[in-house]
Amino acid sequence: MAEKVKYEESHLYRLRHSVSHVMAQAVLEKFPEGKVAIGPPIENGFYYDFDLPRPLTPEDLEEIEARMREIIAEGYDFVYQEIDEKEARQIFADQQYKLELIDGILSAGTDEYGEHLGEVPKLSIYRSGPFVDLCRGPHVSSTREINPDAIKLLSVAGAYWRGDERRPMLQRIYGTAWETAQQLDEFLAWQEEVEKRDHRRLIKELDLISFHEEGGAGLAYWHPKGGRIRQVIEDFWRARHREGGYEIVFTPHVGKAQLWDQSGHLDFYRDSMYSPMDIEGVEYFIKPMNCPFHILMYKTRLRSYRELPLRWAELGTVYRYERSGVLHGLLRVRGFTQDDAHIFCTPEQIEDEILRVLRFSLDLLRAFGFSEFQVYLSTMPEKHVGEPERWEQAQVSLRKAIEVEGLPYEVDEGGGAFYGPKIDIHVKDALGRTWQLTTIQFDFNLPDRFDMTYVGEDGKEHRPYMVHRALLGSLERFFGVLVEHYGGAFPVWLAPVQMVLIPIADRHVEYAHAVAEQVRAAGLRVEVDDSSERMQAKIRNAQMHKVPYMLVIGDREMEAGQVNLRMRDGNVPGAMSVDDFIALAQDAVAERRLL
């Protein structure tokens, strides 16, 4: 076990924060009339938002980067200073975004990134040479600590001020900074591979999913090939849940306002819910969660301890409002299908149930090709519901399950939701990036709000324990992660087209279709490329679409009743009987091999 180490406390964070100030100075020297917004460090780099008189060009970035190296060489110290409101407004008199941030700090007690500053908000600045910024740090002591050969400006993107599409569109410059030039080179090579695997590009190139502004932003359209993969995932998910003792349930897409009021969503979650609709004079909301519906089903009759635990799972489609500025392909959408389940059990059962869920989650994730995990245990925050004794029992159960499985984990002290502690599981993909997928979340709030009970062995009513758990998270986000993990080259069992039959000439087409029928009857997904293209062009096309198997058919194959197998990875096993190939492919699917 390790305490959670925050990136914000690292030297690299301070270094990148400092380079963002250097970049802002260089930009304002080039555009003196420019306005600056915010410029935080982020994972692997930093950004800064600007309101500038014209769009930036690649040549501008080169010029700005060159000036940054000159500023670094000038050796400015980063000097912290606390100031009063009058001085702050004088310093930033011509910087409208900074003035708005000052208002936020003084009125709402939040800093430039929306984080609460405590009971007594302070206005502070950092100076580095002629540049001054409203900032609370941290920074390195001087630009001398910055390696000029280890910085790089990467790109420019549009970003709405405060992420609000009703506010001005700013220009966001992304950059990166490292301690050594070698680290920078390694990062840039890695970044090139990340761009190749960008799911937003691949889902379009592979004809899997599309988005349509005219139909509504943040809503995914699953094409036939994407739909095939989704069906495989869903069928596998349902089969494993039935084996794991879950019952599959289905619930409505809308519910009365009074239901969301009772659940607390209207108090705590309304900004993320879509506007209500009027149905016969009653307000209904489209659901952002499935849990209140599962609770209503639980309460249809009096429950006995003999029935528990109840494990109810649902692939439930929900809708949550996200600002346009934060939508990001499949990773941040407005409509998505949760791989959701709720467990209702007695206090005596909770330890076994948590261990069972944890093992189930790891087993499911491994089936999709993930083998490295980061586990986080989030504990009771200062503001919470439920008795401390129940929290302690829940936290002990979560901790014990992690330790029984021998998983290294980090503790996020006070990081639990107000209604219960949780386990989060992050998976590491093929490029070493981590993605948060599984959440196992206790809930002391909803059982109380809905007065949930069961009759115990003593004949008295007791409050059940409730656990929310999502193993894949959502199908949309999980699919986006899968696309990037595999770079679109899905293992055979997931591939939308598992094989393409490639007849060399027109006289081989009829035989190719006959083989396709035989393969299709064996439960495999196959296409025939009977276009007029040459054989090599057909092979290249199949490789571009990342099809695992290519079956070339010429005179010899047709006469011998065979196919000539070429693999996506370049391996060429050669000629084999159709039955032998079918057996090979079926084994790869059954064993869920990577190829």
Image (cartoon, helix red, strand yellow):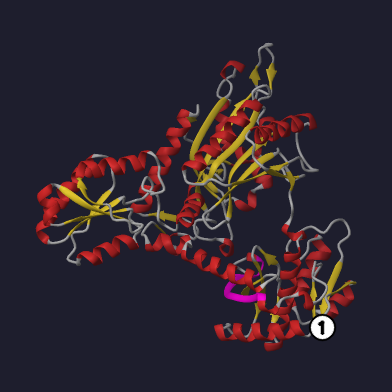
In the picture provided, is 296 more to the left or to the right than 521? right
Q: Which residue appears at 18% of the width and 47% of the height? A: 515
Between residue 381 and residue 258, name the one nearer to us. 381
Between residue 379 and residue 9, name the one nearer to us. 9
Q: Which residue appears at 58% of the width and 65% of the height? A: 325
Question: Can residue 170 be seen by looking at this rendering?
Answer: no
Between residue 236 and residue 576, name the one nearer to us. 576
Counting from the top left corner in percent of width and height, residue 478 is at 50, 49
Q: Main secondary structure of the magenta part?
A: strand
In the picture provided, is 489 more to the left or to the right than 110? left
Question: In the figure, 524 relative to 456: above or below?
Answer: below
> Is residue 157 inside the magenta stretch?
yes
Marker count (numbered)? 1
Question: Can residue 33 be seen by looking at this rendering?
Answer: yes
Question: In the figure, 29 relative to 412: above or below?
Answer: below
Q: Amino acid at mark 1?
A: Gly
Q: Secondary structure at mark 1?
A: loop
> Is residue 94 inside the magenta stretch?
no
Counting from the top left corner in percent of width and height, residue 168 is at 63, 74
In the picture provided, is 259 more to the left or to the right than 118? left
* Other residues around mark 1 within 10 Å, as few (<14) / some (14–19) / many (≥20): some
Q: Which residue appears at 66% of the width and 34% of the height? A: 446
Task: Identify the residue position indicated by label 1 in the image.
Answer: 129
Between residue 171 and residue 164, name the one nearer to us. 171
For the magenta stretch, what is the residue range? 150-162
Which of the 4 image quarters holds residue 79? Answer: bottom right
